[in-house]
């Protein structure tokens, strides 16, 4: 395979290869979500759904390093302790009472950034938790349902709705912009502060089993291939 040298990024050798191989997707997405839309300061709150996903866990880790606090919304109560252990400040099960529960858990602190990778009713519940002038950034649609945004959220809360596809951002970013994101990610990875959870690895000969495992909805980490060298 021949590629342009300008398209390559040198990964520090201190980073374990499995984790290094995944830094460009979810950790890079998380970094852009936290830096591309709202100017967050230390102590600020943000909220996200699908917080147990690889991107959600990366958001928790990076936000903690930045001094920001996270409200993490999940579908299953058994994930609460796990995500708290990983650094999530507040972990709540998604429900119709979400706005009131968020207000109570944060003492009514304004939340200016919401991160949505589910869509449908879950995205609407996130939007309802945002402060006036807040921003909801969508980067996935796990529910396969469209966004449901009432006109009142535009008129009375002046919310912004944005989206990101990290591959498009990467293709359009300059080398300097890419490294401005990669360098702090590399630094966190070298210090053991940024890891993508791996549930199981498979040899390439077991591709069918790997794909079947990856399709399980309740897995807690990535399914990866190991290649013989």
Image (cartoon, rainbow, N blue to C red):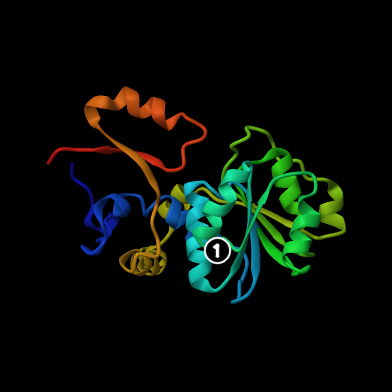
Residue 217 in the figure: left or right of residue 177: right
Q: Is residue 77 visible?
A: yes
Residue 175 in the figure: left or right of residue 128: left
Locate the C terminus and report the quarter of the image it occupies: top left
Instruction: For label 1, count other residues whose C-alpha is less than 10 Å away and answer few (under 14), some (14-19) or many (20+).
Output: many
Locate the N terminus and report the quarter of the image it occupies: top left
Q: Which residue is drawn at 61% across and 67% down?
A: 69
Residue picked out by circle 1: 34
Q: Which residue is drawn at 49% across and 59% down?
A: 86
**120 vs 42: above or below:** above
Quadrant of residue 177 within the rendered picture: bottom left
Quadrant of residue 201 within the rendered picture: top left
User: Residue reaching furthest top?
Assistant: 208
Q: Is residue 32 visible?
A: no
Q: What element carries label 1?
A: helix
Residue 99 in the figure: left or right of residue 3: right
Residue 9 picture location, percent across and down: 28, 59
In the image shown, does 17 or 6 lie closer to the viewer? 17
Q: Which residue is drawn at 48% across and 64% down?
A: 62
Residue 15 in the figure: left or right of residue 131: left
Number of marks in the image?
A: 1
Residue 97 picture location, percent across and down: 80, 48
**152 vs 65: above or below:** above
Residue 111 picture location, percent across and down: 71, 65
């Amino acid at each position: 395979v021949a590629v342009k040298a300008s398209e390559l990024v040198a990964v520090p050798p201190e980073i374990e290869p499995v984790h290094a191989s995944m830094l460009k997707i979810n950790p890079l997405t998380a970094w852009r979500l936290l830096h591309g839309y709202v100017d967050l300061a230390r102590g600020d709150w943000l909220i996200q759904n699908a917080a147990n996903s690889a991107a959600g866990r990366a958001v928790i880790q990076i936000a903690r390093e930045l001094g920001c606090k996270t409200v993490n919304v999940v579908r299953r109560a058994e994930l609460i302790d796990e995500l708290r252990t990983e650094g999530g400040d507040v972990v709540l099960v998604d429900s119709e009472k979400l706005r009131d529960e968020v207000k109570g858990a944060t003492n009514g602190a304004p939340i200016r950034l919401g991160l949505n990778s589910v869509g449908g009713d879950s995205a609407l519940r996130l939007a309802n938790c945002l402060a006036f002038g807040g921003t909801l950034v969508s980067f996935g649609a796990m529910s396969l349902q469209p966004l449901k945004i009432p006109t009142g959220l535009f008129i009375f809360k002046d919310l912004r709705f944005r989206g990101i596809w990290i591959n498009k951002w990467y293709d359009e970013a300059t080398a300097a912009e890419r490294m401005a994101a990669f360098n702090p990610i590399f630094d966190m990875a070298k210090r053991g502060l940024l890891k993508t959870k791996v549930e199981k690895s498979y040899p390439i000969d077991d591709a069918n089993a790997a794909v079947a495992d990856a399709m399980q909805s309740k897995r807690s980490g990535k399914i990866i291939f190991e290649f013989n060298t």
